[in-house]
Amino acid sequence: MSFEGQPPAKMRLLQAAAELLANSAGAPVSTRQITQLAGVSAPTLYHHFGDKEGLYDAVVSAGFEEYVAGERDFAPSGQPLEDIRRMWDNHVHFGLNQPELYLVMFGNIRPESRPAIVADAEALMEEMLNKAAAAGQLSVQPREAARSILAANVGVTLMLIAEPVAERNLDLSTMTRDAMIFAVASDQAEQAEASGKSSVVVAAIALNAALQASHSDQLSSSELKLFLEWLHRISTT
Amino acid sequence: MSFEGQPPAKMRLLQAAAELLANSAGAPVSTRQITQLAGVSAPTLYHHFGDKEGLYDAVVSAGFEEYVAGERDFAPSGQPLEDIRRMWDNHVHFGLNQPELYLVMFGNIRPESRPAIVADAEALMEEMLNKAAAAGQLSVQPREAARSILAANVGVTLMLIAEPVAERNLDLSTMTRDAMIFAVASDQAEQAEASGKSSVVVAAIALNAALQASHSDQLSSSELKLFLEWLHRISTT
DNA sequence: TAGCACCTATAGCAACGCTATATGAACTGC
DNA sequence: GCAGTTCATATAGCGTTGCTATAGGTGCTA
């Protein structure tokens, strides 16, 4: 990673592409604009990056470094779920601060071709969720939770980017964020972790007790009988 | 030059665009392809639709009719929250069945330019949520809930589209869906969480999440389906 | 000094979205 | 019945796009 070892043209192309992209206001950026700003001619771009998408991949890669750096700044607070919240917010802010770059990174979806960056972001999220799982604060597999949270995070960020700046309301982000985190976190999971039992069993036992204590009329008596039988089968695994 | 038996050029252009888009496998479709398949020449397209985006808007509009029709088929089940679930699933299936059209509709995000279709989809979701609110099943403003749910719905669908077909796992959708719906519908659960007491609702929710995380085979798939349905009734009613 | 690998430039291709202009057909008013 | 208007389509081509065939310059090693 020697800064001076980099041929000037390659770096100037990267900087030119990033700069034009950031100021493009959504309009497409042409290779001629990029090469002109970089002060090189067309074939130089293709020599170094193969094609336009290769150049964009390189820009995205640099953008992802920045994204990850932002995520890691907040990392260890001792409360994994709080870190996940910060991670979510950082994701949204990154998208709103650099919408064009974000759209190239996360918005350029094509069928059955997943950008490498999505897998990287998922891995980052999963890594964080593993800490929560280790602390017994997770009721779902960290990988599934990471995919679910990231999907919602991207969806919210794209929605906010698409809105006029004046109408952007971060409550949308906060609300969705807390809904997702609450869904994967669970007090019962904590108990299960402590007692060493499967969370299914713990939850089934808790529900069984609660159902018998309260006179719930959501199910008919025959439904309830069958329900409790299944609950018992689950609990005695 | 126009034969009387043939549909007018405008309709042939629409059909040609829709057909090429559906089979494009993500590659961009040129106006020349469209006009050639429709059997007309370039200016005809621009006479009827203004520009390429105008034609795409028309295709999207037709696609949205189909989308709405799918949504309305399921409409009144008497349980608004169950309708929302079906609406979510229908959204995902629409996206997976017609990924290219879906990407034009919901994936073509640009900063500060919100596609009209997003507002329409939000309105549709909000309308459904209003019924839930009228039944006292909502703890959030229907508009905010609709925006939040739709954002997550789009995010999940885009993620699934980007994945290879073989790896697509609808659990991602189910899990995120229930998390979002639970978050906006959790009257009792919110109280329970705030008070820290275990209740039927909280236990049911925990069991629900735990069951979906661990692939328990204590119940057959049909049993599990019914079980989860009851669980859902207990959790939300 | 010769050779070689790397980097860059000139010039231009095919495809793209789109349009200036023109022609035939159908309707309208008198 | 016929000029005037409008609609729908076609011919031809403009400017821009991503990209490349080809070749020249530069610096290092033998």
Image (cartoon, coloured by chain):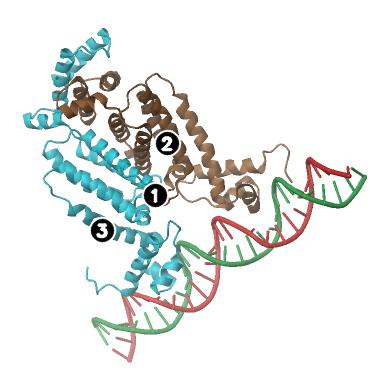
Chain colours: A cyan, B brown, C red, D green
Question: Residue B170's image quarter?
Answer: top left
Cβ atoms at labels 1 and 2 below 8 Å apart: no
Choose top left, top right, bottom left or bottom right for residue A217: top left
Crowd rating for badge 1 (residues with CA inside 10 Å; few <14, some 14–19, many 20+): few
Position of B206 with respect to C21 (left or right) is left
Q: In terms of secondary structure, where does tag 3 sit? A: helix
Residue tagged by mark 2?
B122
Mark 2: which amino acid? Answer: Glu
Secondary structure under the numbered disc 1 in the rendered image: helix
Q: Nearer the viewer, residue B84 or A234?
A: B84
Kind of residue at badge 1: Ala
Question: Of all residues shown, which one is farthest toward the top?
Answer: A221
- Nearest-to-viewer mark from 1 and 3: 1
| Tag 1 subunit | A
Q: Which residue is depicted at the point 48% across and 31% down?
A: B68
Earlier-in-chain disc, 1 versus 3: 3
List x then y, in percent, for residue A76.
Answer: 13, 49
Chain of the residue on which disc 3 is drawn: A
Whole-number angstrom distance, CA of label 1 to CA of label 3: 26 Å
